Image: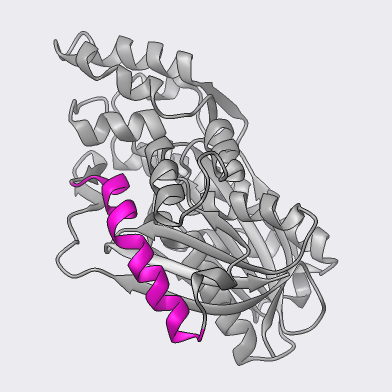
Amino acid sequence: MPAKLLSLATASPPNVLRTEDVMREAAAIFARRHADFERLIPVFANTGIATRHSVRPYGWFRADKGWPERTEAFIDGASALFQDVARAALSKAAVDAGDIGTIVMVSSTGVATPSIEARVLSGMGFRDTVRRVPVFGLGCAGGVSGLSLAARLAVAEPGSKVLLVVIELCTLAFRPDELTKSNIIATALFGDGAAAAVLSTDGEGLAAVEHMGEHTWPGTTDVMGWRMDPQGFGAIFSRSIPDLALADLRPAADGFLSRHGLTLPDIESYSFHPGGAKVILALEQAFDQPSGSLVHEREVLAGFGNMSAPTALFVLERGLAEAGHGRRLVSALGPGFTASFLTVLQ
């Protein structure tokens, strides 16, 4: 029996960052340190982002922060978001916390041991025998890969209920000390957010998770990821992600579908991770979709920015809420360099 997506919920932290304010704050921080910052300002205007959210207000970012401050903010912010989004997913699924057999917790923007789910268990009603699966390092692909993992765990124990929680606090990696292209892109794109889902082989739910797969290209570990130094994470974008999405994602998707006896005409709708405005255009072109057709991707990007792993689940939530049935392809690109795929049936 396939795993059913019993619920899908999303959540955002309270601090809203408008792009015009982010530009002003960035200019105040970078302009006095780097004479050529003006040359990079157009990056902010071309993102397609109007607002995003952060676990910390602007004032927190104005002073240099190291690992202790970033880690404290990550644990506080992620713990609060975990409780908010998990409760929402459980409520939508009409499932009690005590009914959950396994928790999959996905994040790549902070390091915490014990991990976040362990820190909130006792206050949320989860049983003390719940199995914990914290996952780190999947980056922007983490939402789709995490959903695939949760579905496999649900199928492995029919009738059990699996809670997936995906949290990324990308803004905490802001680096005022670096005027690199990667850092400016990260500053212009990234926001914070969370998504959660309950899966089980029992029940009807929003959709059934059908097929799952990944494709990792050799020699591409330098495409995106984190560089770690004494101050914190530093963003790595060493190649053009839109170019890779345009040239390489479609053949990988065709291979994934072919392995399951499908072709692109079998796909009726899409939910992609919208890495940026140019990535969305590349996705439409690569998958032969009309220009402007990836509406949910643009809406999520405009309202929340690139939240890394949860972003594709924000898009999927909107897609599943639409009337209609059929097969949907869900995909995201992440460090590795890896494409994560799954198909769901409504």
Q: Quadrant of the N terminus?
A: bottom right
Please state the extent of the stretch shown in magenta in the rendering: 239-261
- Our reading of the magenta stretch's main secondary structure is helix
Residue 106 makes an appearance in the image: no
Q: Position of residue 79 (x, y in %)?
A: 57, 50
In the visual, does 79 lie left or right of 230? right
Query: Residue 330's image quarter?
Result: bottom right
Residue 39 makes an appearance in the image: yes
The verdict on residue 246 being magenta is yes
In the visual, does 288 lie left or right of 132? left
In this view, which residue lies farthest toward the right? 94
Q: Position of residue 204 (x, y in %)?
A: 82, 76
At x 19%, y 61%, the residue is 221
Q: Along the line of sight, which residue is nearer the eye, 156 or 213?
A: 213
Q: Along the line of sight, which residue is nearer the eye, 254 or 342?
A: 254
Q: Quadrant of the C terminus?
A: bottom right
In the visual, does 158 lie left or right of 75? right
At x 36%, y 19%, the residue is 62
Q: Position of residue 272 (x, y in %)?
A: 51, 54
Q: Position of residue 129 (x, y in %)?
A: 65, 82
